[in-house]
Each structure stands twice: as structure tokens, then as C-alpha cells.
Image: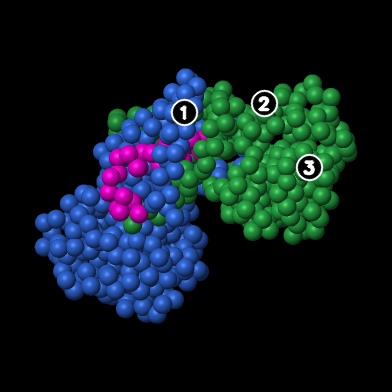
Chain colours: A blue, B green
Amino acid sequence: MRIAIIGTGLIGGSLSLTLRAKGLATYVTGVEQNESHAKRALELGLVDEIASLAAAVQQSDLIVLAIPINAAEAMLPGILDQVDKQVVMDVGSTKKVICEAVANHPKRGRFVATHPMWGTEYSGPDAAVKTAFADKATVICSKEESDADAVELVESIYQALGMHLLYMKADDHDVHVAYVSHISHITSFALANTVLEKEREEDAIFELASGGFESTVRLAKSNPAMWVPIFMQNRDNVLDVLNEHIAQLRKFKACLEKENYDYLQELIEHANGIRRILK
Amino acid sequence: MRIAIIGTGLIGGSLSLTLRAKGLATYVTGVEQNESHAKRALELGLVDEIASLAAAVQQSDLIVLAIPINAAEAMLPGILDQVDKQVVMDVGSTKKVICEAVANHPKRGRFVATHPMWGTEYSGPDAAVKTAFADKATVICSKEESDADAVELVESIYQALGMHLLYMKADDHDVHVAYVSHISHITSFALANTVLEKEREEDAIFELASGGFESTVRLAKSNPAMWVPIFMQNRDNVLDVLNEHIAQLRKFKACLEKENYDYLQELIEHANGIRRILK
């Protein structure tokens, strides 16, 4: 299968590497605006060539949009204009806005809206790895809006990557990811700023930081070019969760202020319930 | 060296396993109030025998206090009463209160206050691992209050474990750990409660939760018996950091409410500064 990867960063690059390693991608055309990224993508063997968008769409069976979601949303209608039998999929972290952007497009059926639940806090071609995606979930949204053969092709790609397929409406997807992904990034960014703001002795942090700190703060390395558009597009859901999270933190604060350690114990025991979900 | 481990859980058990694997501990006596833990500690080979506190102190060269910090603080003066040339060390997450508890004890010099910056979110004998501690930092507090030979013994133990030694005052230690450890646990507990409270569709969380979520929430599995006393003893520092953290989260909230995405971009770029500290 000939594949076009639009955006040769962490996700696009990893997808390309993994699909080539599995023999599914016979030829990969990269589309990349950033010249140094384009050069690295070639050097790292993420793509066989870098070409224009029009050429890439023309010569590929599958076109993967792996750029920040605001750029993907803007570019998708123009790509569908050029598509005949090809399949176009995205891999973005929100689904409602992009689905709405092409809801009435005559070629809507060639587009499959997806979100593989894999990533790291790094970005760019050098962050791409060929062991990505396996054993994680991937979401296909509003499947009934896509042509059956397009969905089948995308399903076969994700199955080859070893991912579990889930199906949901775009709106529901956006609510769930606010809880299981977007809020984690906000708490991590805010925690990094808390520490950087108040703890001026960075050497002490550097020396003392152990696994627990690294674990809760590592997402704060994530790229704003990716995350600002996510928070914009999923604003209402993220605000709901963020308000609840601040309310939960205030409970801990009240326990400490009032020295109510019985209630603090209860709050922690309740939080331990996450063991049901994270094995 | 004959070692007494008081508390055969995650830290005490791991210390025992690691020191035995390295040939430093020739005989380990466990002191364990919880009968099922005592049984497991024997079964898992964490200790050679379970004995009374008095017998353990009597027959050991080094006594390690590895119980929750409130219990350690209560038990330490009585142990020092029974000590002759033996060395007593603790491994607790706060240092001010325990140092104050024995500040005027005639045997204060035999005690070395320490905090190895290693742990996991699990607890009990089954959580013990023999590959613990290596390449992490360990803190020795108020070294000048301890006898030189006692400090040397403890230093040699931590060096054998492959840890970096740091020295600081108990007060400074407690401020730093509020930033690099205690606040991470509070955010993680609160994040777990946020998700458990509002996201009733636990199946969706279970299916969608990826590495990022797991990373920020895993500390929420931590044991309240350990953490409530830490938050009690380090209350003032933790409240300072928690107030700052809530203020930082409110900045993200204000950005979303006012749709001020330029400032949101700035906040995330600032948070990216954590890359200087976490490689």
C-alpha cells in the first residue's frame, strides 16, 4: 500500500516506521512544511520522499493527516476535493470539530476520523519510534459517516499495529478524552509551573526529583503547537473537568487547613479506587 | 553486618533484599506488627526471622526504621534508650519532626536521619524488589548531630546501593520534598477523584486510558497509612505548594474561560522549562 503521511512528527513518523516494519507500507510519501523536519524524516528513513500535498494525495492509497488538529481541520476539505478512491484518515486528539468541518462534503465517505491512544511527551521526526501503538486502544468516530471500504482499510491498519478498536460518536469521544488525557496534561503543565515558579533552587529539584515527580510532570514537556489547539477545540469539556479537579484539590486544602485528617484519609482511600481501572 | 528492619514493607523489604543481594547484610531480623506481613516477609526471604523489637535491637549492628513516619517518630526515643554502639537510621519522607523528637536524647548521636528518594505506589512485603534505590538520590539530614562513625556506616550502606548522597538541614529537606514529592501525590489523588467522581463510565476510562493518564494518576494508588502522616507532619510546606498549584491551575482556567490562547501558549512554554530539569 502506498501511504502519504502529512506531518512527519511523532505520530506520523511512528506510524510510517511501524507500517514499514510490518510490510504494510510499500512506499511512503511525506508532506512536511518544516524544512528541517523534512530533511530529518528522509535521513531517519521515515519516508521515501518528500512531495507536495497534491502529488502525495495523487499517488497514495491512504492519506494520513498527522498534524496539529487545527491545521488538520483546515486542510481536510481541500484534500477530500482531490480524492477519488483513496482513503483519508486523521489521528487527532479531538474529533467533533474535524467531523463537522467535512459533514457536508461530497467526499465525506472517504474520510475516517480516528484517534490512536498512544503518544509521548516528545515531538518531531526524531521522536518517532517503530514500536509504537501496540496494545493500546484506538477510536474510530462516527463510523457510519464513512464508506464501508474506507473503514475496513483503516481497521486493518490499526489491527496490524496491534491496537484495540473502539467505536464512539465524536461528541462522546471528546468528553472521555477530556478526562483521560487532556486534564492530565493541564495538571502536569500547572505542576511544572508551580515548581519552577516557587522552587528557585533548581539544583535541589534536579537532585531530589525521583520517579514519582518525573511521572506526574513528564507530560509538561509536551509541545504547545499540539496542545493549544486541543484545548481550544475541546474547551467546554476541558473546563468542566478542570473545574471539578480544582474543587477536588480544594478538598485536600481544606483538610490540611482544618487539620481534618480523618477526611484526608477518606479522600485518599477514595482515590485508591483508581486501582480498579489501572492494573 | 547484622541488620534489624522495623517494618517489612516496600522500603524495609527492598532495603533488606538489596543489602542481602550485595552481601552486606549477613543476618536480617524483622520487626513486624502485622501478622500477615510478618508471614509474607519470611516466605519471601526478606528477613531471616521475626523477633521482638528488644531482641532485634539487641542483636543487630544497624537498626532501620521503615514504618510510617508518625510511628517512627513515636518509636525512635525508646529504641535509642536500648542502644549501645548500634546505629539507628530512619528512611522517612519528612525529617524535621523526627529530628526534633530526639534532639535532646542522650543517644542522639547514634541516630542518622535519612530519606532515600526511591519508592513506588505499592506497599507491603510483596511490593519489595531487590533492584531498588540504584542511581537515585538519598538525603542525610543534620549530619552534625550524629556521631561520625554512625554517619560513615550509613553512607557506606547507601553507596553500596548505588545512591548519590546529599546533605541538608531537616527544615530545608521538608521544603524541597513538598515540591518534588508531596505535591505530586496530592495532584494525583485529586486527579483520580476527579475522574472517578465525574466519569461514571468507568469502562470508557479503562479502555481509553493511555500512558499519559497512567503516568499522572499512578501515585493515587499510594497507601493512606503512609501519606496521611506525611501531610500532617509537613502541613505548612504542603499547603504553601498546594496554594501555588491551585493558583497555577486557575491561570489555565482563566485562559480557557477568556479564550486567551496566547497566554495559554505562554503558560505551556513556561512549563516546558521542566525539560531543563528532567532529561
> What is the distance, in whole Å, between disc 1 and disc 2 at their CAs?
21 Å
Q: CA distance from mark 3 to mark 1?
A: 35 Å
Disc 2 vs disc 3: Cβ atoms closer than 8 Å? no
| Numbered label attached to residue B97 | 2
B192 within the magenta span: yes
**Nearer the observer, disc 3 or disc 1?**
3
Relative horizontal placement of residue B53, taking residue A61 as reference (left or right): right
Q: Which residue lies at the image location 47% right of the left edge and 68% below the top edge?
A: A131
Q: Secondary structure at mark 3?
A: helix
Q: Which residues are magenta?
A: B183-206
Q: Are marks 1 and 2 on the same chain?
A: no
**Residue picked out by circle 1:** A262
Front-most of B90 and A156?
B90
Q: Secondary structure at mark 2?
A: helix
The residue that disc 3 covers is B55
Give yes or no for residue B233 being in the magenta stretch.
no
Circle 1 sits in a helix, a strand or a loop, which is it? helix
Residue found 53% across the figure and 47% down from its top:
B121
Residue B176 visible? The answer is no
Q: How many residues crowd mark 3 within 10 Å: few (<14), some (14–19), many (20+)?
A: few
